[in-house]
Amino acid sequence: MILVVGGAGYIGSHLVKELVKTKEVVVLDNLSTGHRWAVDNRAAFVQGDLCSEADLAEVFEKYPIEAVMHFAAFSLVGESVEKPQKYYDNNVAATLTLLRLMRKYNVNHFIFSSTAATYGIPAVDMITENTATNPINPYGRSKLMIEHILADFAASYGLKYVALRYFNAAGAYETAEIGEDHHPETHLIPIVLEHLLGQRESISVFGTDYETTDGTCIRDYIHVTDLAKAHIAALQGLLNGHLNTAVYNLGNGKGYSVKEVIETCEQITGRPANVVYTGRRAGDPAQLVASSEKIFNEIGWKAEMGLQDIISSAWKWHSRTDIQNI
Ligand SMILES: NC(=O)c1ccc[n+]([C@@H]2O[C@H](COP(=O)([O-])OP(=O)(O)OC[C@H]3O[C@@H](n4cnc5c(N)ncnc54)[C@H](O)[C@@H]3O)[C@@H](O)[C@H]2O)c1
Ligand SMILES: O=c1ccn([C@@H]2O[C@H](COP(=O)(O)OP(=O)(O)O[C@H]3O[C@H](CO)[C@H](O)[C@H](O)[C@H]3O)[C@@H](O)[C@H]2O)c(=O)[nH]1
């Protein structure tokens, strides 16, 4: 049985939908940002908190857990600057509690949701796992701290783990049963689509003076189902002994500017956007594009979906008329 912590959240719920096809799954989530409806009903669900040893012990006592996939975190960069305590408590201290309980119950396989934010403002156009990590905010630092802790636990306790550094997760499940539903929403693609649905008056483009082709920031967008498949490949690698410890980037290897994303949304939906150009958002690197060659070479995963697929699937999800009531 696989324990998915944070499995009611955006990325975790998409992973669960794939994972239940081949594994028994239990989700632990406190529903602070996730949704009970997003958890596939083939998975067991425990409403509980990662910070609580008692909640974790209940799960480890009740279910024969062979691996843990850990998605639970706070992940708003701006908020992490204002409230670092909240971020270090939930992203670092609570993860240490989870790792302690895993040791107590002899669970030795771990998959961790890390982030491109561990790189900070990279000096290269194409980021590999060897690019220096230099996070520029508490959120990125909280994730890198856990990566260091995992390496120490692997060396001293034999923990087997994979840390997956996602670039910009986007898109929705192919049937539109689940999709991105953050409150507040801060991510570009859902914001643009909500605007095109008439739910926002305009879209702000944060900065037009970056040293990029059109002056707006470039990001590497990765479909959430591709992310889910990478987790499953990593899990198989850990469980069959092919992998011991690994850190992988997860991206498409292709960058799109904010303007290009908005144009693609306009093309796919056939609707014009009302765009307002504003100043830079603090802490945004000009360009973040991943090389994901390492994971392809080692376990054969690569992204299958591009920006069109991402936006089309997200549009199908956001255009559901009943979405406000679920
Ligand atoms: N969305 C992205 O673009 C992106 C990019 C890189 C990394 N990540 C990382 O991926 C992971 C998932 O991101 P997401 O966008 O799905 O976020 P999300 O907020 O939708 O999901 C997080 C889930 O964890 C749960 N949770 C949080 N704290 C908890 C606690 N103490 N106990 C129990 N449950 C708790 C929330 O209720 C939620 O269901 C996070 O670790 C995030 O840092 C996300
Ligand atoms: O209304 C908006 C929202 C975003 N942007 C721009 O669009 C780009 C993408 O922004 P997102 O907020 O969608 O994503 P980020 O690149 O800031 O961050 C995401 O990816 C990071 C890693 O790359 C971290 O993991 C982080 O948690 C995750 O939210 C950025 O240049 C941002 O300035 C706008 O112009 N207007």
Image: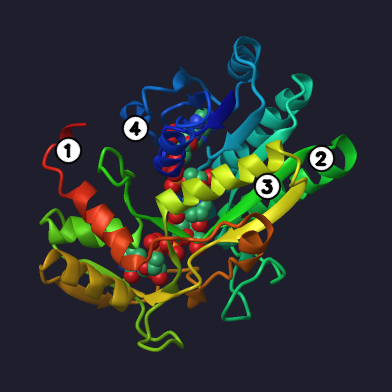
Q: Secondary structure at mark 3?
A: strand
Residue 189 to residue 235: above or below: below
Mark with earlier residue (2, 1): 2
Residue under pointer 1 = 324
Residue 90: give x, y in percent of width and height: 58, 37
- The answer, for residue 79, to whether it is visible in the render is no
Q: Is mark 2 within 8 Å of ligand 1?
A: no
Quarter of image, res 118: bottom right
Circle 4 packing at 10 Å, graded few (<14), some (14-19), many (20+), is: many
Q: Residue flagged by tag 4: what amino acid is it?
A: Ala
Which numbered circle lies on residue 153?
A: 2
Q: Residue at x 65, y 19 (%)?
A: 53
Mark with earlier residue (3, 1): 3
Q: Secondary structure at mark 1?
A: helix
Which numbered circle lies on residue 38?
A: 4
Residue 165: give x, y in percent of width and height: 59, 56
- Alpha carbon distance from label 4 to label 1: 14 Å
The mark closer to the camera, 3 or 1, is 3
Which numbered circle lies on residue 162?
A: 3
Mark with earlier residue (4, 1): 4
- Alpha carbon distance from label 2 to label 3: 12 Å
Q: Is residue 171 left or right of residue 246?
A: left
Residue 259 to residue 106: above or below: below
